[in-house]
Image (cartoon, rainbow, N blue to C red):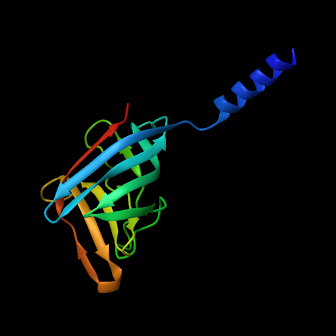
């Protein structure tokens, strides 16, 4: 009886814990190549977007060190907050995209630019220490890992 009770409590605790999915992602464009994994919440929102909760990988050979919090902008891109959302259907990123920091003090914000002359994926890059930015068009893909 005690074992059955302990098992029931354990199953209840696991069911109440937030589930997560792992995704493989990458993008390439002029002067940029980035790839890695996302952790997302297990269930999408009403628009089919999953919230990105963690990130690993590298961009141009530099380690990604952290995910930009949703509702904030990467340094050097003030006024453009990220939402950290990804989905299976195209376009896979929102207009706000996701943001991340790299080990060398630079930042990136890939997003879907529906409002651009050429609607496509773009990746805003900022190097605040050297006051440099770029925003190339990129080919972005993300898939849920099996």
Measuring from the top left, give residue 48's x and y in whole percent: 39, 36
The quadrant holding residue 64 is: bottom left
**Measured along the vertical axis of the image, is residue 6 above or below residue 131?**
above
* Left or right: 18 as drawn, with respect to 101: right
The residue sitting at 29% across, 85% down in the picture is 130
**Relative depth, front residue between 20 and 109:** 20
Q: How many marks?
A: 0
**Relative depth, front residue between 116 and 62:** 62
The residue sitting at 39% across, 74% down in the picture is 75
Q: Would you say residue 114 is visible in this rendering?
A: no
Measuring from the top left, give residue 67's x and y in whole percent: 45, 60
Q: Quadrant of the N terminus?
A: top right
**Measured along the vertical axis of the image, is residue 83 above or below residue 21?**
below
Q: Would you say residue 25 is visible in this rendering?
A: yes
Instruction: Determine the residue located farthest toward the bottom in the rendered image.
Output: 130
The quadrant holding residue 111 is: bottom left
* Left or right: 142 as drawn, with respect to 115: right
The residue sitting at 73% across, 28% down in the picture is 10
**Measured along the vertical axis of the image, is residue 13 above or below residue 122?**
above
């Amino acid at each position: 009886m005690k074992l059955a009770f302990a098992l029931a409590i354990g199953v209840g605790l696991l069911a109440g814990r937030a589930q997560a999915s792992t995704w493989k992602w990458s993008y390439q464009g002029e002067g940029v190549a980035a790839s890695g994994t996302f952790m997302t919440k297990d269930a999408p929102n009403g628009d089919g977007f999953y919230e990105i909760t963690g990130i690993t990988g590298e961009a141009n050979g530099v380690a990604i060190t952290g995910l930009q919090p949703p509702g904030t902008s990467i340094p050097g891109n003030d006024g453009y907050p990220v939402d950290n959302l990804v989905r299976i259907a195209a376009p896979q990123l929102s207009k706000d995209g996701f943001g991340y920091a790299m080990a060398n003090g630079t930042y990136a914000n890939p997003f879907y630019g529906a409002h651009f002359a050429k609607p496509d994926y773009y990746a805003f890059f900022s190097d605040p220490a050297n006051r440099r930015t770029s925003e190339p068009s990129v080919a972005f893909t993300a898939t849920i890992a099996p």
